[in-house]
Amino acid sequence: MLTQRPYGSWPSTITAADVAAGTIPLGGACFYQDSAIIQQGRPSEGGRVTLVQQPLAEGGTEKELVPAPFNVRSRVHEYGGASWLLIDEANAVIFSNFADQRVYRLTLADGTTQALTPESRRDGEPLLRFADFSIGPSGSVLAIMEDLSSEPVRHIVQLPLDGSASDQVEQIRRLSAPARFVAYPRLNPTGEKICWISWEHPNMPWDGTELHLAEWADGGVLPDTVIAGGPAESIMQPEWVDADRIGFISDASGWWNPYLYHVSSGRTTRLIARDSEFAGPLWQVGTRWYLVESRHELLCTYGRGTGALARLHVDTGGLHELPLPFTGLRPLDVRDNWLLAATSSMSAGEQITLLNLENLEHRPLAHSIERLPEPSLLPAVEEFECRNAHGQPVHALLYRPRNAGYTGLDGELPPFVTMVHGGPTAQAQAKLSTAIAYYTSRGIGVVDVNYGGSTGYGRAYRNRLRGQWGVVDVDDTVAVIDALVEEGIADPNRVGIEGGSAGGWTVLSALTNTQRFTAGISRYGVSDLVGLVEDTHDFESHYMYSLVGPYPEAADLYAQRAPINHVAQIGCPVLLLQGDEDKVVPPAQSQVVADALAERGIPYAYVLFEGEQHGFRKAQNIIAALETSLAFYAQIFGFHADVPSLTLTGS
């Protein structure tokens, strides 16, 4: 017997505290002796990132390797990534520390630490930053070095492991000529050759990169040759298959597919031709989508929207999918027919999983969601596709309200929250999200939109956003909601939209250009394009060139698109959530919207979170942001919520 209660007011045991405390950000992992080393976040410690050692045998107890106050997090490109590396021969881990961005060596036998790079602060900001470590010649590692002492440049460098560069920057050897951006330094197994990728402004790495190859020499910068890529071809993740062959992923065909370069012959071979993505956008340096299992086989993740695991035979191009119950999978390390992988599913969320490649048996070693909600409270996911006004396909993930035993009132349609991912070159992926379940278990539907410009559906789909940011993303998002309303799934009078960063831009653009939505939440959202161009970090400082146009040549278009110039057209209440230390989208971006809303008498609330950067990592702030969002929807949509009420300015 179903109990009827208004949508949005269903009782749920999933609290905002559960979402925050029960969600542990997981990163990379590798095998170490009879255990795994796993990167984990600590929301209860202000978002600190640490490394833990987890025995492979069941029932083992994890051991934290990197103690506070160390924080294993790089600031290269501000998004960081690949911030640590196990050095087997030294029985040590090296890592970038967030506060000073110095590289430290942690000896695993006794837990002692030693600085490997020098102090480099100016006005409190580290000028030298390191990430994307890989094994170098004996006694050293390779890395990206970001140098912000003048005009930003990046080099591939060689770091000695003996600490000799801890106070002498001259001991850090620059291997590559200065480039705006570099990634994936890889030395071949014999130590004779090195490869890496680079790209220059105004390109982003998914627009165009170049693959470099150089002979190893013992002194000076290495003369290199570009062997693949260009301004309109995106090369990702070069890896040595053996001493003479480099595997890499290119989207020259319109899809990120795997290729092989033969150094001795200079010949390039496309290993497989498939309308599927074998890679994604390089937001964080060092991201891997495949592993070299042997000189004959690669372990790849691929798909369209979702990610499956397969073995790719290098010599024949044969692809054999491994049937596994995951909606997403990224291989992290492989050893003796065992795989460590980052996996996601609708039942267990994100995990670090140990997988036997012979019989495909698997079990989790670490969980992002420590305490899973009751299965009766979890939504199912549906792949939703519709057509926009131009007849083009638009992809989305649909989560209907679900709480076993409850249904809405007779004749009532559920309110819906439209989620818009950031990036905007990113992708909403099917996985258990307690934040989504927080809404759906209370009777609020959620649709997560992969508008044109999202990854996962080929370069042409990605390129739909070129020059059209604030247009295509808005039109596609509206098309999804129109389709849900037309099919009788969503209440047309109770439709919210929310997103962070670039998703916040789409929120504000949708509110200023359409009347489809009745409530909007922007989390650290972009509102002023000129401000973003003039006051953002180097990695994204030219991103607007492809999304909108060159500045200042296209200044009129920037003004036309910017939501801040059209706040008077907003016809619904707005909630603004912002971190006060955000370098990617500074607080001024939200403040100008709040000021304009106040001036025009539009109901709003602005919450500034102390000590947060681009994205909320502190448990208390995650809780506050989610409860405030629910209270906001409850007030606008007219249902009772089990959180403190919210007062809107101007209401």
Image (cartoon, rainbow, N blue to C red):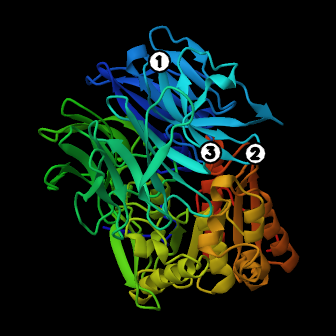
Residue type at tag 2: Glu
Q: CA distance from mark 2 to mark 3?
A: 36 Å
Q: What separation in Å lies between label 3 and label 1 (alpha carbons)?
A: 24 Å
| Residue at 76% from the left image edge and 78% from the top image edge | 555
Q: Which residue is mark 2?
A: 610
Three-letter amino acid code of the residue under disc 1: Gly
Is 429 placed above or below 313 here? below
Q: In the picture provided, is 415 more to the left or to the right than 163? A: left
Q: Nearer the viewer, residue 136 or 455?
A: 136
Give 230 or 309, whichever is nearer the viewer.
230
Report how far apart the C-alphas of labels 1 and 2 lie in the structure. Answer: 42 Å
Q: Residue at x 59, y 66 (%)?
A: 503
Q: Residues at badges 3 and 1 in contact (C-beta under 8 Å)?
A: no
Q: Earlier in the sequence, mark 3 or mark 1?
A: 1
* Tag 2 and tag 3, C-beta contact below 8 Å: no
Residue beneath disc 1: 139
Depth-wise, is mark 1 or mark 2 nearer the camera? 1
The N terminus sits in image quarter: bottom left
The quadrant in which residue 517 appears is: bottom right
Badge nearest the viewer, 2 or 3 = 3
Residue that carries the numbered disc 3 in the rendered image: 178
Q: Which of pointers 3 and 1 indicates the residue nearer the eye?
A: 3
**Whole-percent x, y for residue 445 in the image:** 46, 70
Q: Earlier in the sequence, mark 1 or mark 2?
A: 1
